[in-house]
Image (spheres, rainbow, N blue to C red):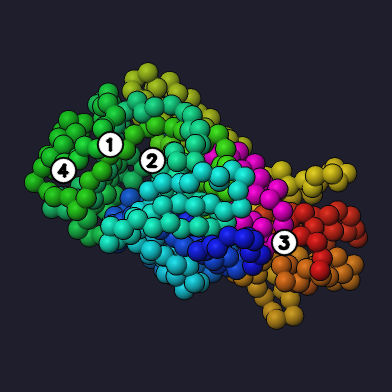
Amino acid sequence: MQPVEGTAMDTDVIVVGAGPTGLMLAGELRLGGARVVVIEKLAAPTGQSRGLGFTARAMETFDQRGLLPRFGQGESLQTSPMGHFGGTVFDFTVLPDAHFGARGIPQGDTEAVLEAWAAESGADIRRGWEFVSLAGGHLDGDTVEITVRTPQGEQRTLRAAYLVGCDGGASRVRRAAGFDFPGSDARRGMYLADITGVTLRPRHLGERYPGGMVMSAPLTEDVWRIIVCPDGQPAHDRERTVTYAEVAEAWRHITGEDIGAGSASWVSSFTDATRQASAYRRGRVLLAGDAAHIHLPAGGQGLSTGVQDAANLGWKLAAVLRGDAGEALLDTYHDERHAAGRRLLMNTRAQGTVYLGGAESEPLRELFTELIAHDDVKRHLAGLVSHLDIHYDLSVPGEPQAPAHPLTGRRMPPRLLVGAAGEMRVAQLLHTGRGVLLDLADDARTRRAAVGGEDRVDVVTATLKPADGPDALAAATAVLIRPDGYVAWAADGATTAGLEPALRHWFGPAR
């Protein structure tokens, strides 16, 4: 690692928050060789289910790190071809490789998988440690310094090259570092609970009544997840404890069903507040996950977006710390993920208007039902909600802007390859967290372009197995894939034009 001269550091990166985003980021940083300390004010995980799965693109992100088997195999890792947008159901398989993501995986299980991976990778995870304050100088200094409270109640100072706030929608790091967080305040309050002792019928995608909307789904034989969205319910005070009696009464008011005899393992409330940080980086402080964006929960997109924030930031931050890249690489984190976050807020606000609106939204619901009958609309919405439609601008500054390959800036499709070692999946090549240069035409010029960068980019000579249906890679002769699975450069035919600038820009000069 490249040390920061003249200042003793406790670690390279301090991550505040041990939720899915913070734990994913810790594992990513360790893959890149960075030292990382994760501080989390909770002494132990809550074990609460909260999010119940993740999007198709988040599944691919986990697959790129070899993590999917840890979530289970076969029936224990379920996906569904059917999804919805604002409650209007449609088939996601109109888009190649698309589905509605993994279903039925409690957020506590996701956190357990990511924490085990991060810890095995060497991340220092400190539970019961609470962020207190941030010292000045984080914008242009050589280090960032924070004060923390230990489990023993003592205050200590920690220093690092970078600080990343992954501490949720009420992020202390965001406030301490002076990030703007514009958006709209909450207009309505809703409830979430896991309950036992009652018999319900499944309402997996929700059901509207004159007084609001409810959802119900079995988590186990005895436990049901319910979501209750009363029309006209004001936003809740975040400091007030929500009771099960309150949730049961809201359910009865909407459905007429009495679930008061049951009990809840936990209850919570949420709102439709929508906000996004104006910048994801201020000097040596960065934000990811809910610390950078909050929105109405819709389709597991919040957890999934945070995981993708971490996958985008981790390899870049590690590259800067190794000295392979300059600070400008970190600016691409904001450029790419802020745009993705903006689309997330757009689609969740649209879904809330259609799904949760009262009688005034009925014309919108009718219109969406008509529009989703068209395959091109289905493809657009499936890409939006699955996050498979993300398209980054990966042009290289200062280089001639020739027409880019159609896949440049998009995620590498999950294809099968045939190489010297037999069949392999593209995701397997990304398990190390390094870049991959696929030589699909056995071209020595392609391989020579990566000479001197072997410690950052793996060169793999292979051929693609034919795909069913239209194939954007049918004529491809070479593809450069970033560690987060996005195509940085690709070529059809006998050319390597633009490859060396792309390698330098994303992975640093040859050594």
The N terminus: image quadrant: bottom right
Would you identify the image quadrant in which residue 359 lies?
top left
Query: Are the residues tagged 3 and 2 within 8 Å (C-beta)?
Result: no
- The residues bearing labels 4 and 1 have C-alpha atoms spaced at a distance of 16 Å
In depth, the one of 314 and 417 nearer the eye is: 314
Going from N to C along the chain, the mark reached first, 1 or 2, is 2
In depth, the one of 105 and 91 nearer the eye is: 105
In depth, the one of 477 and 510 nearer the eye is: 510
Q: Residue 165 lies in magenta, yes or no? A: no
Tag shown at residue 170: 2
Query: Are the residues tagged 1 and 2 within 8 Å (C-beta)?
Result: yes
The answer to whether 45 appears left or right of 97 in the picture is left
The C terminus: image quadrant: bottom right
Residue under the image location 26 percent in, 32 percent down: 236
Q: Which residue is mark 1?
A: 238
Q: Residues within 10 Å of mark 3 (few under 14, many from 20)?
A: many
- The residues bearing labels 2 and 4 have C-alpha atoms spaced at a distance of 24 Å
